Image (cartoon, coloured by chain):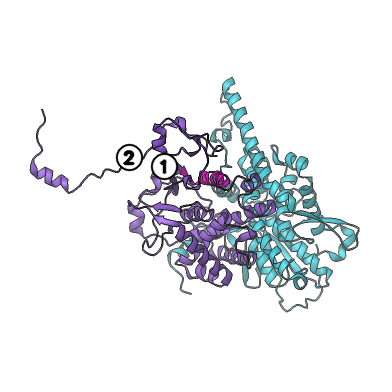
Chain colours: A purple, B cyan
Amino acid sequence: MSIPMPTTLQRFYSLFPLHMYEQEQVLPTSFFFSNVSPEASEAGGYQVEDIAPDATLFIHPPSNPNQTLLSSDIECVKWQAYLALRGIPGGVKVRWDLANEGAVGGRLPNLFLPVPKRLAKKEKSGEPSKARMRGELLEGKRIPSWVNGEIGKATGGEEGDEELEGYKDKDAQNESKAWIALLEGDVHAVFTATAPTPSILTKITSFDLSNTREKPILSTTFTGVSSMIPPFGSTAALEPILGRYKETIEALSVRLSHDRWFLGSRNGTALDAIVFSYLFAAMESSNTQVREEVCKWANLVAWEKRVRKMVENATSLRGSV
Amino acid sequence: MSDNSSPNTTQEEEKISLYVWPHFWNLPSFDIESLAAILYLQLAFRHHNHKHEHHKYRLVECTDPDVSPSGTLPFLVHGTKKVSTFHGIVRYLESLDMGLADEGANKEGEAHAIRRAKRVAWTSFVDSQLKDLVNHVLYAIPENYRKGLHTALVAHLPIPSKYYLPQRLRAVVQASLEPSGLWTVKEEEEVVKKHPFDKEKVKDVVEEKDSIIREAFGKEKLVHKARETLDLLAPLLKKHQHQHGHHQHTFFLSPHPTGLDALIAAHILILSHAPLPINTLLPLLKESYPAIIEHSEQVLAYAFPSEDNAEIRADVQVVQVPHANPVVQLGRAVGRILQSVVPVQA
């Protein structure tokens, strides 16, 4: 016996409509295999269009969605560029209606690999093809192994190529780790140090529930560490950080010289994606010193422009958002 | 290391003063960056003494990191200019042409510039990966910390600071190790029996096994990480024939010692010279990477040559700066607070 809702209440509630989102297809876990894709399935030949149709990357919203689809968060741009440069056919779609706290691992970006519709039909006919079952949400760390697996299969799977992840040789791969450490250490510190401090109002009203910790940058406490007052607060030591930043940008420019990709790789690699994301962030930064330092080196500016065009061409907005 | 009264013919009359953490364990300093800075200065000045440009510098043993503008030691004072952090010091010396990086500058041109760029990348790699590993061994394992760094710090610090400064420094290192998962200290391990009349807790057999397994996994993880890092550094060590053909020197990435060598050698020397009871990395180094240990000892020998080669030694004057007394420190701290709250008009 239910009491009908009074019309005033109905009208009031109609001001807050309930949105229903379509259910994403998820297969039962027995069809999921490890992230490194297995060999070509019994279902027959492997076609290029089958790689990740409609792969969608959840990112932080870009600063100006009309002008560019590249996110305002460095980590998201890294993965956007990585997916674009490694050549995922069909490009990558992006959407930004997911918050940091809702992401896998507590950190955006996440890659969503939906189940392709034609496979869903195939499944009904009783032919599960192991190689293409998806419907997962991958966090950042798991993206490279997925990409390596997919690219390896699509290009005919030369074992050596897949292991080298696109680098010229083993030496270049080792050196790339050093460059990545440089970028994610010293250059990242500059962005943390020069990030605009949020106003008191935003500090009070925003909830930062992220539990990911980043490495602390060189900073001093307000009171110093050796007096009897317990240390509190911190100010970044800007001079050494900026000095090191200038050194690293110069080194990057010298190392790139006139190559098409860093370290002479044939196509874009993870290192190129990371360099691009930091250069992009530097050009968009509100701090003039950070921006000018990159603008000094013409080859870096030209390279960044070229790669930005490539990444933007490969990225598209997901239709339904 | 005595004070020579030779006339200073260079234009800058001011001497270079390098402020570092004091000496301990047969090493000029017990701190990684300070030791790296000392090694770099020694190598650079020895290199210049070879070319008959005599430089002198003053080594100041300081225990108060607040004296430096960035709050960390080492830092360099030259006249009115203050430069801190190892990389800043190397950059500053190179800008004054007193550094190590001028070998082959004009001859090779591009290759030299690219080698230099590679060095920048590798020093950053060492700064993040190798330093984390060494800091883990020094700070994160309580027995190592108690018998190693804590004793070194306490030996040099005066009365009020010796009760709180080491913990604060350790907290800073903890903050930098936690993101990479290398800080594995469990708080219970730190509790020592408070009163002599406390009954000793009879540990469960299961608890013992748990802690043994946890320790073993922790060591395995550390060794695995160390292998990853050292596997990347070991191929960079190249053998070069010395000019006279007698010695075979091995340095990272170039035929002459550079800042990268000083930095890596500092890490390895501290690992090998500090008396740490649980040192998992040293046997790994000795077994699988003896070339790296040999390199670090060689750099030390190069930087501090024996008595026979007295003429190529740098002129160093060692001075000890006493720790400021607590009232002065309080005043300094209040001054810093005021400075940060009230923006200074330049």
Q: Residues within 10 Å of mark 1 (few under 14, many from 20)?
A: some
Q: Answer above or below: position of B61 versus A39.
A: below
Q: Which residue is mark 2?
A: A23
Q: Residue at x 75, y 77 (%)?
A: B10
Task: Indicate whether residue A150 is drawn in magenta.
Answer: yes
How many numbered marks have been drawn onto this rendered protein structure?
2
Residue B141, numbered circle:
none
At a point 46% along the width and 57% down the height, the residue shown is A314
Question: Which tag is nearer the camera, tag 1 or tag 2?
Answer: 1
Q: Position of residue A227 (x, y in %)?
A: 54, 55
Contact between labelled residues 2 and 1, with CB atoms less than 8 Å apart:
no
Q: Is residue B194 visible?
A: yes
Residue A116, label in figure: 1
Q: Where B274 sits versus B95, above or below?
A: above
Question: How many residues crowd around disc 2 within 10 Å: few (fewer than 14), some, or many (20 or more)?
Answer: few
| Residue A170 falls inside the magenta stretch | no
> Residue B305, position in %: x, y?
84, 58
- Identified at 78% across, 72% down, the residue is B107
Q: Which one is nearer the viewer's eye here, B81 or A138?
A: A138
Q: Tell me the amino acid under the disc marked 1.
A: Pro
Image coordinates for residue B140, horizontal then vertical, percent: 61, 41
Q: Nearest the camera: A62 or B22? A: A62
Of mark 1 and mark 2, the one earlier in the sequence is 2
From the viewer's perspective, is residue B187 above or below residue B103? above
Specify start and end residues of the magenta stretch as a single range.
A138-154
Q: Is residue B196 left or right of residue B35?
A: left
